[in-house]
Image (cartoon, grey):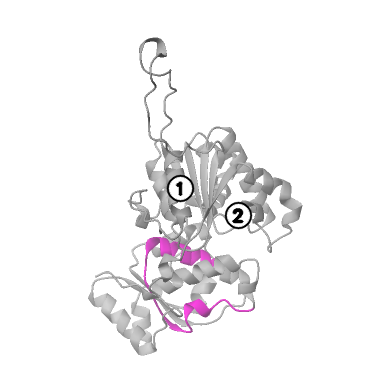
Amino acid sequence: MSTDKQHSSARLVDRRPSFSGAELVSGLVPPPQFDTASFESYRPDPDYPSQEEARELLRAFAAPEAPQSRGGGGFFGFGRKKQVEAKPSAPAKPGIYLDGGFGVGKTHLLAATWHATAGRKYFGTFIEYTALVGALGYTGALGVLQGARLICIDEFELDDPGDTMLMTRLIGDLTAGGTRIVATSNTPPNALGEGRFAAADFMREIQAMSDRFLTIRIDGVDYRQRDITGDAIALSDDAYRFALADVAASGERMTDDDFSTLIEHLATVHPSSYAGLLAGVQCIGLRDVHELTDQSAALRFVAFIDRVYDAQIPIRATGIPLTSIFGGGMLDGGYRKKYLRCMSRLNALTASEIEQ
């Protein structure tokens, strides 16, 4: 590939986005791919009844509260009571925690709950809420979120003691004020932090947070992998060059970055601003993909791919398959589920077509 061709394409590493607290708050809505997510458009797998059960429970959770009945038919409440169809009742706890594997529709259900809930509401990833506290301070962030009818937290993870204390306190203060919370994760709330820090030292805080949720386990098969087998697609240098040309010819915009340089650049951008790297990008090009052995770099890349997947931007890459980058025993450590989720998304993104 010629040097001129490389430098004529846009590069992610040339971007240094940052967001103010107000911008972070305005961005607390479902990703574009879930703009129209609803309970009706969710397709539960009949082989896994827990998917249908989760949908109906969340539908009840999002429904407006019914007025209190004042008795049956007839004068003064006498007479036969009207028969109504039995429906799942909303849980008494202020929160629902969706625990399940990859690609079983947890985020779809989370977005459907958000859309079906009336009133002030927010939707964001775990890292977006911690970033909001970083930008506004705890009191400022609480002041913004407090009083909302619903807070949706996607990809709930507790990676360090600071996050544990922060999120348990925030959830406690929000629910005390009447706010309801729905969260998704690949880890049950009583197992958060295991393998990453001394979770036992913070068990009281973790348990206090867990007690506020009704945990729902959703089983199923990763829908992203149903028609995909093997590793993420890696292109030859020639195929990569043709991909750049094809995207340019279609009027779309494809970035072109060296993988190592992008990994270094991600360390200079706060993860809450990774979405800003992707503005206007229709396809991402990565050259010379290689194995990562630094866990901090790997976790930053996972956070970046989460935003790429939210935006549904295809990836074209050379080097080793992107699903093979997590080395040094990372897949055997405490972040295994994060890496596996990322691999699932990378597989889908490298196989996806570029919209013309």
Mark carried by residue 232: none
> What residue is drawn where x is 46% and y is 65%?
221
Position in image of residue 92 (x %, y %): 55, 36
> What residue is drawn where x is 39% and y is 85%?
235
> Which sits in the foreground, 136 or 328?
328
Write the start and end of the magenta stretch as one range. 300-328
The answer to whether mark 2 and mark 1 are in CB contact below 8 A is no
| Count of numbered circles in the view | 2
Count residues near mark 1 (Cα–Cα under 10 Å), then give few for <14, some for 14-19, many for 20+: many
First in sequence: mark 2 or mark 1? Answer: 1
Quadrant in which residue 120 is drawn: top left
In this orientation, does residue 28 appear?
no
Picture quarter with the N terminus: bottom left
- Residue 301 is a magenta residue: yes
> What residue is drawn where x is 63% and y is 59%?
159
Q: Amino acid at mark 2?
A: Pro
Q: Secondary structure at mark 2?
A: loop
- Residue 6 is a magenta residue: no
Which residue is at the far right?
A: 201
Q: Which residue is mark 1?
A: 123
Q: CA distance from mark 2 to mark 1?
A: 20 Å
Q: Which residue is mark 2?
A: 188
Count residues near mark 2 (Cα–Cα under 10 Å), then give few for <14, some for 14-19, many for 20+: some
> Which sits in the foreground, 185 or 215?
215
Of tags 2 and 1, which is closer to the observer?
2
> Which sits in the foreground, 211 or 156?
211
In this orientation, does residue 178 appear?
yes
Position in image of residue 277 (x %, y %): 43, 64
Taking the image as shown, residue 220 lies to the left or right of residue 298, namely: left
> Which sits in the foreground, 115 or 141?
115
Position in image of residue 301 (x %, y %): 52, 69
